Amino acid sequence: MTAFRELSVNDRIKTLQSEGLLSENETRLLLEQQAESSRTNIPADIANHMIEHQIGKYTLPVGVVRNLIVNNEKHNVLLATEEPSVIAAACNGARITAMSLEHGIIASSPSYMTTVQIVFEDYDGTLAKRLEDVVNSRKDEILNISDKAHPSIVERGGGARKCRVEALKSFAKLSIDVDTKDAMGANIVNTIGEAVKAQLESWLGCEALVAILTNTSRHATVAEVHLPTISLASNKLPESEKASEGARLARRIAALSAFAAADPERAATHNKGILNGIAGAALASGNDTRALEASAHAWAAHSGSYLPLSTWSIQEYESQETLYGRIEIPLQIGIVGGSITSLPMAQIAIHVGKYKTSNEYRNVLAALGLVQNLAALRALAGPGIQEGHMRLQSANIAIAAGAKGVEIEEITNKLAHMKDADRNAQTAEKLLKALRDLNN
């Protein structure tokens, strides 16, 4: 069977259709997009109304992470990314975690809330006490005002759930937690915040400073996996060497994880790698990547030190030595509303991934971050990350040198077999000139 990566773009699309992941209309859209470049990516009328001063459309490649097993279900995850090796690494990580003792990754998400903050200036500390008295005596009324401000979310089973007051230095803050169901909920809670703000100003007799959502989260999704250490060894090794090599890689991956926990500078890069896939998937599905990344980094620092979002350690599990991986990450995303509903490619991403609820999508995203991290640490623990990355970067070098059509693949193949020092734009330009001279 031909590997998915070796299929033409058209054949990849048709493969997804044959697997029931794409409808006939979605398949036609992707094939038209392939034939007509970016013209069908975002319809002109939609693009013109999404942002201000719109003059064009920016296109990124969209690829598929194949067969990521989460909670015993296979998912195909669409990613939009410009970076070579992100999808390849995620596919490799998904392949390895399929050999786990859980037969994939186990993930769980709590009931997420999106929070709006209504803030008052409070230089002498008296307003916080008055605000608390108001909330204690009028809590049900505040929640009712919240729900009336956005009745459609209540009709879908969501709405305001809790409110609490906090006294800060020179400020008093009311936070309202809102269940926005399968929407990310930024616009929903901002509308609620404005309504409650107006009423609080009337009750307190003073002007609020601001009503705005926070992109932090009080909740996080957890994904975990137990890998037999032998599963980390390369398939190219003789069987007799796999056990020892797997154990060696597991120990080094655990050591790299411990180093990230000890060094915030390493933790930042560790977490960036986790977000490579998560942010790409969020972008492909029309979600707010900036909000997602801000929340993730805030969670990484919530202890007072900046820490890795994932950890890896050696554990005895079911009477064997395993590499245990765990990620804890807040994921403020949705599968309906805003750009998700208006962008055709976002709808395809949700459909192909089979995400029935936002929590199911969160579970898949957390698992994606974990496999992305595993692949990166395995490369660092073994041959290093640069060799494979630069080989995949060869295509970008060929394109930057001016290669077109079939020239791209020919120059890419030649660059991929060169030493790192020779794999650069100058070499690509020389190869391209020689190729064109030969064909003329």
Image (cartoon, grey):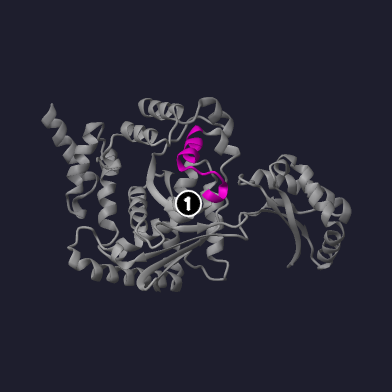
Q: Position of residue 29 (x, y in %)?
A: 43, 27
Magenta residues span: 344-360
* Residue 350 colored in magenta in the image: yes
Front position in the image: 302 or 51: 302
Q: Residue at x 50, y 58 (%)?
A: 107
Quadrant of the drawing holding the C terminus: top left
Along the viewing direction, whichever of 35 and 437 lies nearer the viewer: 35
Q: Which residue in the protein does label 1 denote?
A: 364
* Relative to 31, 204 lies left or right: right
Rendering coords of residue 115 (x, y %): 68, 54
Picture residue at 37% right of the left edge, 52% below the top: 90
247 lies left or right of 284 = left
Asked if residue 157 shows in the view, the reply is yes
By secondary structure, the bulk of the magenta-drawn segment is best described as helix
Task: Give the total number of marks visible in the rendering.
Answer: 1
Quadrant where the N terminus sits is top left
Q: Please name whichever residue, 62 or 113, is drawn nearer the observer in this view of the structure.
A: 113
- Taking the magenta stretch, the answer to whether it contains residue 299 is no
Amino acid type, mark 1: Val
